[in-house]
Amino acid sequence: MGEVLPYRPPRAREETTAFLGMVVFLGSWAMMFAALFFAYGFVRTRSVAWPPPDLPGLPWETPAINTLVLAASSAAIQYGLRVIRQGASPKLGRALLLTVLLGAVFLALQVSVWTRLYVEGLRPETGGAYGSVFWGLTCFHALHVLVGLIGVGLLTRRAFAGAFSAAKYLPVRLWALYWHFVGAVWALMFVLVFLL
Amino acid sequence: MHAEAHPAGVHPEPTSFLRRYIFSTDHKVIAKQFLWAGLVFLAVGGSLAMMIRWQWAFPGRPVPLFGMFLSRSGGVITPATYQSIFTMHGLIMIFFAITPVMIGCFGNFTIPLMIGAQDMAFPKLNMLSFWTFVISLILITASFFVQLGTAAAGWTTYAPLSTQIGTPGAGQTLVVAAIFVTGAATIMGAINYVTTVIRLRSPGMTYMRMPLTVWGLWLTAILNVLFVPVLGAAALLLFLDRVFGTQFFIAGAAGVKGGGDPILFQHLFWIFGHPEVYILILPAWGFISDIIPFFARKPAYWYRGSVFAMVAVTVLSAVVYGHHMFLTGMNPLLGKGFMTLTLIISIPAEILFLNWLHTLWKGSNRFPSPMLFALGTVFVFGLGGLTGLYLGTIATDLYLHDTMWVVGHFHLTMAAAAFLGSFAAIYFWFPKMFGRRMNEGLAKLHFWTSAVFITLVFCGQLVAGYAGQQRRLYDPYQYTFLSHLLPLNRWTSYFAFALGISQFVFVYNFLSSLVAGEKAEQNPWQVGTLEWTLCPSPPPHYNYATPPVVIRGPHEFANPDVIKALGRDWIGQTEPMPKVAAAAIKPAAGGAKD
């Protein structure tokens, strides 16, 4: 019997497969965040006072700016996707760099929110359910932003090295989807946790 | 990129030992890795079950054999150790034995082969899934060796027992982390299965021509993708509570500023947990839905009905979780809704059941070991399903809740049916996996002992539960109203020990067949699915040289045209109908090519 060699479907088909895999993954991860929001809703509807009287309320200004920052960075990576479809590799590099920078701004502003509230006395171990939700949800989300930053950061390096072209940009597509997902989760978190 | 023999990204068959057997991306090798891991932990979980049964038969007496692990108490199971034992029995069996064997092993092995693919959609992710699973195995093993021992909050890990207040040891934290990690591994595998079935079916392999095994595993994967993350969220919050001092699940005196709510954990757990029980049975339904027609030598009765029933169960399983929580102060109206939805599940389950029976009806039934195990699965699942009706109904659940009746019920469905279903799959696919046959006589001995004793064990539990014995009691006979149940429990334990001992028949058969079994031919069972008709045993790397072109469903048996033209009662999924016979008798019979 002869050696069995891999047969490969056309590239476009393979890319659609990879994209579908990413969609399934993000769908799955959306369920995890849905469960976290469910947990939040559950403890909040059962609490007597939210926030408890002696604890600081959550600010809405910085998180609102942060929502805009993430939206802008999502727009930047989407722009990168558009230009690489036309083959403009250096433009893609600059768009990805902007995405990373805006992501870093988001994290920096998050850190400022955390420090402020920590100083004002909102701590995970003494904040009750209120503090738990704030710290648990925002930190878990920030972890996803961090993963995105590393991923898109590596992409940026490859983009400047000219690794992507109009025919070959699948990783950009996948990371863009991930980045939009992280932004959408944040937008939801902003409304549910900070505004309500 | 150009179309070469080895285009970039696809590598030729690896030759180094490490790449070929350890860090392999071949779905068949990964399947075997999961099988080994799962069987080892099946033995661990089984040993823990034997210790529980010893405690209920001879409370306070030193355990023979396993007593050496309990040296500090002189071989006696102490109440604290007992907590750990039943906790870890449940967790190990569910997440580290049934899941890897059914989903990790057979999901990996059968899906690409049965749909005519060369591998999974994401082979590297597949490898990562197994090695992530290994990390969780390390965590769970390590938890046995830390101070205060391993987890002791029950397999359901209910808060607040599972928080620092109930179980302060590092063991519980490690186990919670292990659950999160194994969940991640499961999700990786499930993403692969879902995508592979959608994208990599070979030409002509429509959804309605897929073997029911693939249907079962695919629906399982969909449930895994959607609901394991919810368990992940529960484990994550519990981990935060334990390690960072948050208060999601802590209330009452220990709660700061009102704290959180322990009932929240039950919600999150059962939103995952109820789909999970179908995650553990859907693959078995798939296996036996194929194996029964294969050995009844008849097309599966109402194939579409079986598919519809499995899909319906998958959908319904997502909306019934509340029936685990009737006694948590749930709004009675909500409880009634959950009860109704729960009882509705019995309709698709009955459709499946009747389809199996109709397939057997007037079949040319043969009874080799896979068929016996499949029929055993049908039997114990039937018992489990019927006993479940009393738990889904609120009026009876009030009395049966938290008794051994519950234990007997879910062991009949999740343990006995999943156990016998897994063995049906192991005996059926062993020749294809390893290229050798297992000893049929020993396999039958294994079946009869396993099926009889497993039924007796769990029926014994049902009876004890009906008599009022609460589950998880360290020494039930301290209660006068239960003390007369000692003989019953002792007999149940004897059956359990017999069940445990009879597994050595399998161990011997499995190992000796691996090295010295008779060489398997390509299609020993004479069935028509792709892996048996087109692949040698074992299949080569990349399975198929060209994409198989499928022209019919998986159970084409006893077709008179085929018997006349080919002299056999089956025809492969890719095999064209012989022209003469097809033209002479009925045109286009069974989707013939011409």
Image (cartoon, rainbow, N blue to C red):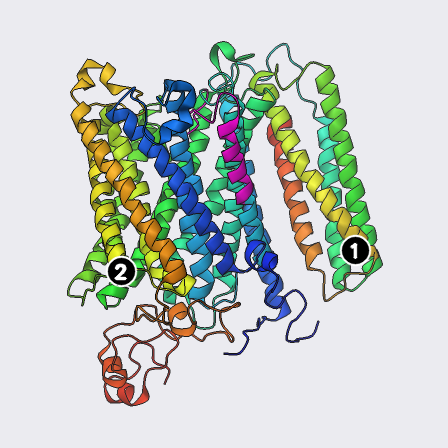
Assess whether residue B135 is covered by the magenta stretch: yes
User: Marks 2 and 1: CB-CB under 8 Å?
Assistant: no
Q: CA distance from mark 2 to mark 1?
A: 58 Å
Q: Amino acid at mark 1?
A: Arg
Is B343 situated above or below A190? below
Is A113 situated above or below A81? above
Crowdedness near tag 1: few (<14), some (14–19) or many (≥20) residues, C-alpha within 10 Å: some
Q: Is residue B444 visible?
A: yes
- Residue placed at 74% from the left, 43% from the top? A149
Crowdedness near tag 2: few (<14), some (14–19) or many (≥20) residues, C-alpha within 10 Å: some
List x then y, in percent, for residue B541: 53, 67
Name the side, left or right, on which B463 lies relative to A107: left
**Closer to us: A154 or B366:** B366
Is B129 situated above or below B561? above
Q: In this rendering, do the residues under marks 2 and 1 share a single chain?
A: no
Image quadrant in which you'd find residue B389: top left
> Badge 2 is on which residue?
B440
> Badge 1 is on which residue?
A158
**Closer to us: B408 or B366:** B366
- Mark nearer the viewer, 2 or 1: 2
Q: Amino acid at mark 2?
A: Glu
- Residue placed at 72% from the left, 47% from the top? A151
Chain hosting mark 2: B
Q: Which residues are magenta?
A: B133-160
Disc on res. B110 = none
Q: Is residue B84 visible?
A: no
Name the side, left or right, on which B540 lies relative to A172: left
Name the side, left or right, on which B190 lies relative to B471: right
